[in-house]
């Protein structure tokens, strides 16, 4: 098999290199790639069957990326929650650590598309500042390596960062967020997984959006990671024309489980500038969750979340399974839409609590 370095070097980075049969207007798209980097590995390009198919849409630039629909360049206000360069510290006990500017390919819908591919905005030379910040903040027990894509770094570079983080006593777990198993499975070498397993407890969240991305090569790479004892989760972005369909989503989740990956999140698409054409309604997302829960293995049902615009963090969304709560009973709806009643306990001391829960539910609606 070709080395991952060579595969990466052969990636398409210019519109004029796109295959002729894509019939793309180079002049129109040049402006887009001036603003938002393009890169497509030859491997991922080879998976595209037809112009405009779900894989094509994820990586081939589109003129609509320059349209202004009132969306934001930094929809999650990550820059505001960045105490030092490369760290996003929003939650009490964990933080993101952006250690790489590059990805194996660039997703057209990326939340950090203002930054990825730009080594001035995600600066590798500032990594020691991030490590110092984590060392100085003893409340951080979970460090999430992100970027860009951390697995684009060389084994040596990645290991030097992992070693330093692992040496910090209050860091309990390390996570890596990566789309490399999807875009460049060649990168998941036996040498890399041997190296990673020295830094347990290490978790990895991968990023697959469509069942066609789970090729034999990708499944093999995921197997190597799982064999190294790394629990694998998957984060999917709900995208119009890619996976906004209950059957496609169910097949994706089932294929992930067969590849030893536990679905973790489905994200409602963030309000990222230039991605209006990817956004779906929330109802669509709820319909998809409803089509999963009960109809297939509970293991195949991820949490559906919205990352709140402005930096409020992830907020879970659930179809309505609780129809009514009173002191006497709870009226529930099952996955088939049938109604069931659960009698409350006669222990009145608990009723106060339940009422508070009910108010809480109401407020959330
Ligand atoms: C998503 C995210 C995390 C991790 O969230 P979990 O729900 O723990 O997976 C941490 N920090 C930031 C800023 C995030 O966006
Ligand atoms: S791999 Fe992740 S960080 Fe890189 S472009 Fe895609 S979504 Fe953005």
Image (tube, rainbow, N blue to C red):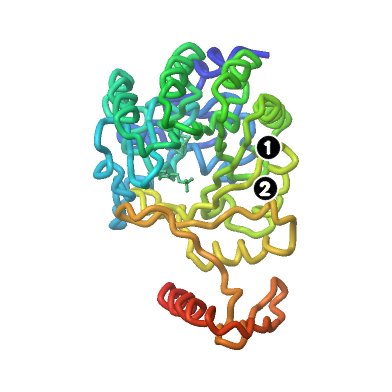
**Residue, disc 1:** 214
**Front-most of 217 and 296?**
296
What is the x, y in percent for residue 26?
A: 40, 33
Q: Quadrant of the N terminus?
A: top right
Q: With 313 as the anchor, is 156 left or right in this view?
A: right
The residue lying at 27 percent from left, 43 percent from top is 81
Q: Quadrant of the C terminus?
A: bottom left
**Residue, disc 2:** 252
* Cα separation between marks 1 and 2: 8 Å
The disc, 1 or 2, on the residue closer to the chain's N-terminal end is: 1
Residue 149 appears in the picture as rendered? yes
Q: With 115 as the anchor, is 11 left or right in this view?
A: right
- The disc at residue 302 is none
What is the x, y in percent for residue 339?
A: 69, 82
What is the x, y in percent for residue 206?
A: 57, 37
Which quarter of the picture shows residue 56?
A: top right
The residue lying at 67 percent from left, 63 percent from top is 293
* Vertical placement of residue 329 versus 306, above or below: below
The residue lying at 70 percent from left, 82 percent from top is 340
Which quarter of the picture shows residue 229?
A: top right
Which quarter of the frame holds ligand 2?
top left
The answer to whether marks 1 and 2 mark residues whose Cβ atoms lie closer than 8 Å is: yes
Q: Secondary structure at mark 2?
A: helix
What is the x, y in percent for residue 86?
A: 31, 31
């Amino acid at each position: 098999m070709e080395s991952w370095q060579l595969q990466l070097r052969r990636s398409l980075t210019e519109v004029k290199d796109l295959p002729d049969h894509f019939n793309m207007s180079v002049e129109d798209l040049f402006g887009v790639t001036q603003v938002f980097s393009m890169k497509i590995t030859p491997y991922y390009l080879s998976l595209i069957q037809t112009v405009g198919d779900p894989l094509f849409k994820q990586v081939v630039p589109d003129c609509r990326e320059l349209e202004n629909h009132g969306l934001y360049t930094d929809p999650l206000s990550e820059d505001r929650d960045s105490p030092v360069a490369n760290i996003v510290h929003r939650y009490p006990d964990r933080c993101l650590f952006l250690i790489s500017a590059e990805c194996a390919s660039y997703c057209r819908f990326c939340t950090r598309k203002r930054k990825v591919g730009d080594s001035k905005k995600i600066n590798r030379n500032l990594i020691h500042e991030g490590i110092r910040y984590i060392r100085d903040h003893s409340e951080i027990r979970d460090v999430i390596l992100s970027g860009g894509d951390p697995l684009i770094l060389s084994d040596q570079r990645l290991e030097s960062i992992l070693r330093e983080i692992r040496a910090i006593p209050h860091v309990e777990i390390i996570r890596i967020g990566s789309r490399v198993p999807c875009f460049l499975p060649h990168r998941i070498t036996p040498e890399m997984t041997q190296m990673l397993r020295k830094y347990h407890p290490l978790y990895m969240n991968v990023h697959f959006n469509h069942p066609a991305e789970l090729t034999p090569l990708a499944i093999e790479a995921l197997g190597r990671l799982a064999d190294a004892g790394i629990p694998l989760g998957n984060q999917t972005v709900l995208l119009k024309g890619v996976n906004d369909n209950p059957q496609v989503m169910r097949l994706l989740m089932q294929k992930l489980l067969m590849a030893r990956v536990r679905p973790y999140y489905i994200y409602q698409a963030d309000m990222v500038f230039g991605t209006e054409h990817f956004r779906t309604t929330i109802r669509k997302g709820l319909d998809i969750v409803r089509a999963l829960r009960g109809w297939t293995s509970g293991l195949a049902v991820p949490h559906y979340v919205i990352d709140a615009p402005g930096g409020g963090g992830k907020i879970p969304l659930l179809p309505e399974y609780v129809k009514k709560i009173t002191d006497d009973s709870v009226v529930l709806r099952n996955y088939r839409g049938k109604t069931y009643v659960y009698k409350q306990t006669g222990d009145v001391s608990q009723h106060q609590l339940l009422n508070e829960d009910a108010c809480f539910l109401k407020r959330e609606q």
